[in-house]
Amino acid sequence: MVTKCEACPLRRRGLFTAMSEEEIRQTQRFKVGEMMVEGGTPVLTEGAHSAQLFTVLSGLGIRYKMLENGRRQVLNFVFPGDLLGLQAAVMGEMGHTVEARGKMRLCVFDRAALWDFFKSSPGRSFDLTWLAATEEHFLGEALTTVGQRNAEQAVAWALVKVYLRATQLDLTVSNTMTLPFKQQDLADALGLSLVHTNKTLAKLRERQIATWRDGTLTVNDLDLLAELGLTTTQAPPRRPIM
């Protein structure tokens, strides 16, 4: 069954700003359906022309770019509420690939209706701009991490960001969350080798700060993890949802 926007479960999460009844109706008119994607399946492919935009209703994924030599740079991790495909809608083709990690449920929007959406729904259009600006801000922070944090600082920073985002989405139970990413995904996001990443995670585990194994992340000391990552435990700002 297709989820109606007025009954969207994400609207009850603390991460997202409230929507007026008119905004809900505007979004519902923009939505054309839903799609289920299995883990390991590309949702959008670098260089492809997509006729659709997506909002992640449930499930996690990654965004990445491939180099000519076959190496990969993970740009960021995808969570429920993230908007996918806006780059292709504006620039004509995707500049990166989005791949599901585990089952993912997506709300589907018609890209062809995007410009009418901007004309008829200026408030919701500003929300789209806000989401794009937030994505740019995060990429700047990630680039700073790759260039200026050492391995321990980078891994700690990434785990804090993932854990805080999951907490606001009610994806954590006590101090634990399901984390379907691979350690290679983390290594490719931080510009580290898999061996170096695994050694760094082992050190965090030995110090009983954080443990990531068998698809589960447990954070025992969030404050210390944030201190190691040269970041804070301040929750991400509330954000709009499409």
Image (cartoon, rainbow, N blue to C red):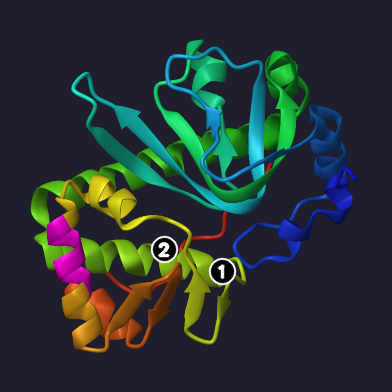
User: What secondary structure prevails in the magenta region?
Assistant: helix
In percent of width and height, residue 156 lies at 24, 69
- Who's the residue at 21% across and 44% down the image? 143
Q: Is residue 72 above or below residue 212?
A: above
- Residue located beneath label 2 in the image: 162
In percent of width and height, residue 82 lies at 57, 45
Where are the magenta residues, as a range? 195-201
Q: Amino acid at mark 2?
A: Val
- Who's the residue at 52% across and 40% down the image? 131
In percent of width and height, residue 137 lies at 35, 44
In front here: 111 or 56? 56
Quarter residue 26 falls in: top right
Helix, strand or loop status at disc 2: helix
Helix, strand or loop status at disc 1: helix
In front here: 196 or 135? 196
In the rendered view of the protein, which quadrant contains the C terminus? Answer: top right
> Is disc 2 surrounded by few (<14), some (14 to 19) or many (20+) residues within 10 Å?
some
Count of numbered badges drawn on the protein? 2
- Who's the residue at 22% across and 50% down the image? 190
Q: Earlier in the sequence, mark 2 or mark 1?
A: 2
- Who's the residue at 33% across and 78% down the image? 211
Quarter residue 38 falls in: top right
Q: Is residue 110 rendered to the left or right of residue 190? A: right
Q: CA distance from mark 2 to mark 1?
A: 10 Å
Quarter residue 119 falls in: top right
Instruction: Indicate which label's residue lies in the foreground, 2 or 1.
Output: 2
Which labelled disc corresponds to residue 168?
1
| Residue 196 in sight from this viewpoint | yes
Q: Amino acid at mark 1?
A: Gln
In percent of width and height, residue 162 lies at 41, 63
